[in-house]
Image (cartoon, rainbow, N blue to C red):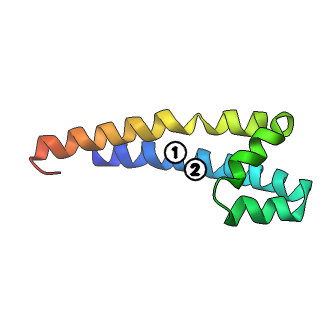
Amino acid sequence: MEIVALILMAIGGLIALIFGIQLLIIAFKTHILWGLGYIFVPFCSLVFIIMYWDDCKSPFLKSLIAIPFVILGSVVAGMSAGAQGGY
């Protein structure tokens, strides 16, 4: 079961990575300071996504697809650890 959990979490991580890079590219295309802020300044990415919603809507919403994979992988890993008597 650990392998299934790992695969689910890896799929979720890959989805988040792909669309996160797309959002970063959009930030750098807008302005280099937006791109640098997106990387280094906390919550700058959230502000950027809100301000440029029309450009960021598609990759942001697609990145949310990763959440069920990560949650399901975590649940499967937890069930597997519980069945073995450990955490």
Per the rendering, the mark at residue 77 is: none
Query: What residue is at 90 percent from the left and 53 percent from the top?
Result: 30
Q: Which quarter of the figure has residue 70? A: top left
Q: Position of residue 62 (x, y in %)?
A: 67, 35
Q: Which residue is labeled 1 in the image?
A: 11
User: Which residue is most to the right?
Assistant: 30
**Quadrant assignment for the N terminus:** top left
Amino acid type shown at disc 1: Ile
SS at circle 2: helix
Q: Are marks 1 and 2 in contact (CB under 8 Å)?
A: yes
Q: Position of residue 13 (x, y in %)?
A: 53, 49
SS at circle 1: helix
State left or right for residue 12 relative to residue 15.
left
Residue placed most toward the observer, 56 or 12:
56
Amino acid type shown at disc 2: Leu
Q: Which residue is labeled 2 in the image?
A: 14
Q: Is residue 36 above or below residue 14?
A: below
Disc 1 crowd rating (10 Å Cα; few below 14, some 14-19, many 20+) is: some
Query: What residue is at 71 percent from the left and 51 percent from the top?
Result: 45
Residue placed most toward the observer, 62 or 8:
62
Q: Position of residue 29 (x, y in %)?
A: 90, 56
Residue placed most toward the observer, 60 or 1:
60
Query: What residue is at 35 percent from the left and 42 percent from the top?
Result: 74
State left or right for residue 33 relative to residue 76.
right
